[in-house]
Image (spheres, grey):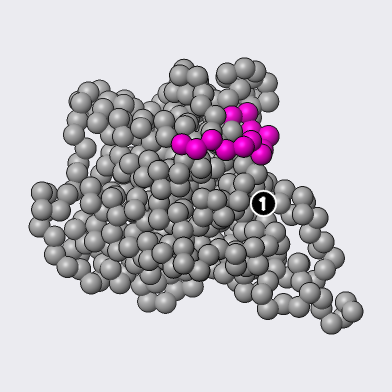
Amino acid sequence: MQEQKKKSNAILDIGDRPAPLQWFGLSLQHLFAMFGSTVLVPILVGLNPGIAILSSGIGTIIYILMTKGKIPAYLGSSFAFIVAMQALMKTQGYPAIAQGSIAVGVVYLIVALIISRIGSAWIDKVLPPIVVGPVVMVIGLSLAGSAANDAMMNNSHYDIKFFIVALITLGLTVFLNMFLKGFFSLIPILLGIVGGYLVAVTFGLVNFAPVMHAAWIALPAFEVPFVNYQPGFYWGAILGMAPIAFVTMTEHMGHIMVLDQLTGRDFFKDPGLHRTLSGDGLASIVAGFIGGPPVTSYGENIGVLAITKVHSVFVLVGAAILAVVFGFVGKLSALIMSIPSPVIGGISFLLFGVIAANGLRILIEHKIDFDEKRNLMIAATILVIGIGGAYLQLGQFQLTGVALATLLGIFLNLVLPKQARNED
């Protein structure tokens, strides 16, 4: 992995390698942060959560290799494909989902090839701070509903015990962030999750039965073509999932914007958008070949980077390796899966909020003037459509709130004049 010149206020920058014990704790923290969302996708679709964790680890390693070890990002199960995958699972089963996932990866690779030919100089014009700042805010705040749902709802019913555990987890994590020193100041998210888990145990919210019955060593539930099933050709899966790749690409670019801001880099130029897209695409193809859902970069892990100021790519590689190992250790997988949703919700309040705050910081640092109507129109449109979850539905194709808000923001930035006529 190539060392990079330190350009941010990180405690550990991208090329910095932590000490072994520190490394393990920091990597475990990232694994726990992404866990809730990554296993939720396969649970909703009817896939095996263990293979989703495994494919997230393998996908992350592929991504980091493709980006030359320059981008500290973790890939987890993508939510954008849930509706399409649920429909395919009910009709044609996982072989169709696998083909759709592979098709998604191929679309990424085709777009990456085009960008490698035409370059990425257009990005600065298309994505100035007035677009990037609100989009980053939307990425964080659009997930707020998910965090609140995890924190409050027990099987679709409000549960005060859930909310108390979530608030204690949040409060504990905030306290640890503010008052810890030394090594422990680097892992407040992990410690917050552990503390929240112990609180959840006292509230009777943890079911240990699956942990007790799980085997120590267990082969993940692989779904490999020609081994576990005979693949067919599923046009419906390809046409239903491949177009959604353009939606997740927009979200992917949003995450790169956030990482640019956090690390003081320009990843669109180095290692280049074509490499980040290629990494994402190859990861989804591999996931399709082993039994997992398509993968994408994760806001939860970006939140961890923002809070801890530990940007080391080695930490993300460690998290990926742990995910792969945990995929084969039945009791460890079961233990992680026993973390109740209010603990994840309490942590998510902080993680998603930090992402949104970084979007606000972009606007402040670039001194965006909201007395100018142009800036006001762009930001207002992005924020309300993105946070409100408005989406565009055309048959099976759905343009999600984040993607729709981003595209509208880009459009307004390109077509609106510098000044309104009544400002001349």
Residue sitting nearer the eye, 46 or 317: 317
Q: Residue 27, image x and y in percent?
A: 45, 29
Residue 18, above or below 81: above
Instruction: Look at the image and give the residue range highlighted in magenta.
Output: 1-12
Q: Residue at the far right: name it.
A: 424
Name the image quarter holding residue 11.
top right
In what quadrant of the picture does the C terminus appear? bottom right
Front residue of 375 and 392: 375
Q: Residue at x 57, y 18 (%)?
A: 183
| Left or right: 62 in relation to 314 | left
Res. 51 in view: yes
Residue of label 1: 359
Q: Classify 215 as above or below 306.
A: above
**The residue under label 1 is which amino acid type?**
Gly
Q: Quadrant of residue 366?
A: bottom right
Residue 39 is one of the magenta-drawn residues = no
> Which residue is found at the position 51% from the left and 23% from the top?
18
SS at badge 1: helix
Main SS, magenta region, reads loop
Q: Residues within 10 Å of mark 1 (few under 14, many from 20)?
A: many
Q: Is residue 236 above or below residue 146?
A: below
